[in-house]
Amino acid sequence: ITSCEFSGCAPTGGALALVQGGWVEDCVFVTTNPSTYTGTFVIADSGAFRFDRCEFSGGPVIKPDPPSPSYDATFSRCVFTDATLRPSQTLFLPEEGQLDLHNCLIARVHSSTPIIDSRFAGVEVRNCTVADTSAPSLVRLNATTHVTTVRNTIVWPGTIAQWLQGPG
């Protein structure tokens, strides 16, 4: 999927459902009313997904589609901005598999939950910038979370309280 715009995304559900993998590039996902947005931009169902140069504005980015919660997702050179999340929401919700963020910008994301809530997934954050967020941590780890790597990532002072948050 190339050069698409998903604007005015509905307040519930998902803008794009991906099954068995896919590649999305140069696309824009926008909700016009972030305070009422309870859905997610991408619902993933098993497979490997790649997002290049995409912009996500106003809501949660990706979550699994049960009963197949295992997917691998790579976001490269993407921008995630202007999201005010409810206590039940997180920007990224990888259940199983691998979530990678490379050369991305996360800005103006306000949440009482971590930006990434890793249940049983591996997480890698490389060469990213995190600015003007109110999340308590970048990644919340579960007792069974796979390897989590954060390298060459810039986090502006006062943006998050801690890099990693343990279970509990």
Image (tube, helix red, strand yellow):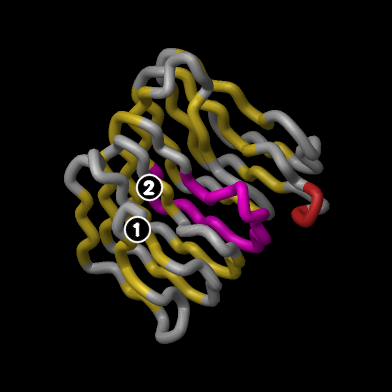
- Tell me where the magenta segment starts and ends, as one range: 75-92
Using the numbered discs, state the Cα–Cα distance from disc 1 to disc 2 in whole angstroms.
Answer: 6 Å
The amino acid type of the residue labelled 2 equals Ser
Q: Position of residue 40 (x, y in %)?
A: 63, 38
At x 57%, y 64%, the residue is 112
Q: Position of residue 6 (x, y in %)?
A: 71, 37
Q: Secondary structure at mark 1?
A: loop
How many C-alpha atoms fall within 10 Å of the one at disc 1: few (<14), some, or many (≥20)? some
**Left or right of 67 in this view: 151:** left
At x 67%, y 30%, the residue is 14
Q: Magenta span has 25?
A: no
**Left or right of 128 in this view: 115:** right
Q: Quadrant of residue 68?
A: top left
Instruction: Name the residue tied to disc 1.
Output: 103
The image shows residue 131, relative to residue 63, as above or below, that is: below
Instruction: Name the residue tied to disc 2.
Output: 76
Q: Magenta span has 87?
A: yes
Q: Secondary structure at mark 2?
A: strand
- Sequence-first disc among 1 and 2: 2
The amino acid type of the residue labelled 1 equals Asn
> Which of the image's four quarters has the C terminus?
bottom left
The image shows residue 76, relative to residue 97, as above or below, that is: below
Residue closest to the eye, 23 or 121: 121
